[in-house]
């Protein structure tokens, strides 16, 4: 499966300029909507980095013309589910061990229209 990174936002610690993680927008070949992927290194989790940077990242995606985004998370990853919901994503599909969340950054369409995007997801 081919992958293309459209947008990457690297997260650094303000005090010491240390790299703490990233948020990126990628496209997997065969998928209709780009996927949001992110990682915070363990020692920096639960310190508010995603709370601050996730909305900035999404604004950058919207400014570049990306509207419909997908995020796949493990069912047991409560912090990820919380950050997605806080930023307008909603649960679209249960994929076994994973959950698919979607968002329309234009905020002027009924999100149920975009459940179709998730129906063809093959990432498990």
Image: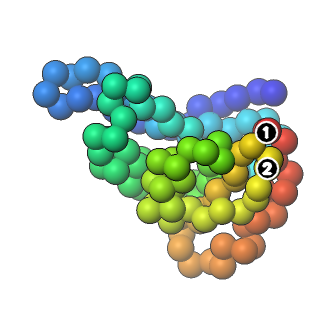
Quick check: 37 above or below 104? above
Classify mark 1: helix, strand or loop. loop
Residue at 76% of width from left, 59% of height from top? 93
- Residue bearing the label numbered 2: 95
Position in image of residue 102 (x %, y %): 64, 59
Image check: 79 left or right of 15?
Answer: right
Q: How crowded is mark 1: few (under 14 residues within 10 Å), some or many (20 or more)?
A: few
Instruction: Name the residue nearer the viewer: 16 or 109.
Output: 16
Q: Is residue 102 above or below residue 110?
A: above
Per the model, the C-alpha gap separating discs 1 and 2 is: 9 Å
The percent coordinates of residue 36 (x first, y second) are: 57, 44
Q: In which quarter of the image is residue 65?
A: bottom right
Q: Which of marks 1 and 2 is in front?
A: 2
Q: Position of residue 94 (x, y in %)?
A: 76, 56
Mark 1 and mark 2 residues within 8 Å of each other at the beta carbon? yes
Residue 11 in view of the camera: yes
Image vertical order of residue 108 relative to residue 33, above or below: below
First in residue order: circle 1 vs circle 2: 2
Q: Position of residue 28 (x, y in %)?
A: 73, 36
Q: Which residue bears the numbered disc 1?
A: 123
* Residue for point 81% across, 64% down: 116
Quadrant housing the C terminus: top right
The answer to whether residue 72 of the structure is visible from this angle is no
What residue do we see at 47% from left, 48% from top? 79
The numbered dot on residue 109 is: none
95 relative position to 3: left or right: right
């Amino acid at each position: 499966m081919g992958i293309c990174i459209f947008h990457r936002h690297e997260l650094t610690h303000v005090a010491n300029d240390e790299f703490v993680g990233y948020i990126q927008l990628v496209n997997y070949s065969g998928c209709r909507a780009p996927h949001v992927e992110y990682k915070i290194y363990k020692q920096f989790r639960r310190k508010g980095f995603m709370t601050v940077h996730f909305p900035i990242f999404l604004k950058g995606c919207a400014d570049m013309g990306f509207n419909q985004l997908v995020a796949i998370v493990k069912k047991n990853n409560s912090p990820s589910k919380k950050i997605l919901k806080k930023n307008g994503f909603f649960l679209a599909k249960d994929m076994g061990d994973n959950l698919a969340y979607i968002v329309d950054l234009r905020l002027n369409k009924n999100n149920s229209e975009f459940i179709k995007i998730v129906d063809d997801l093959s990432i498990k």
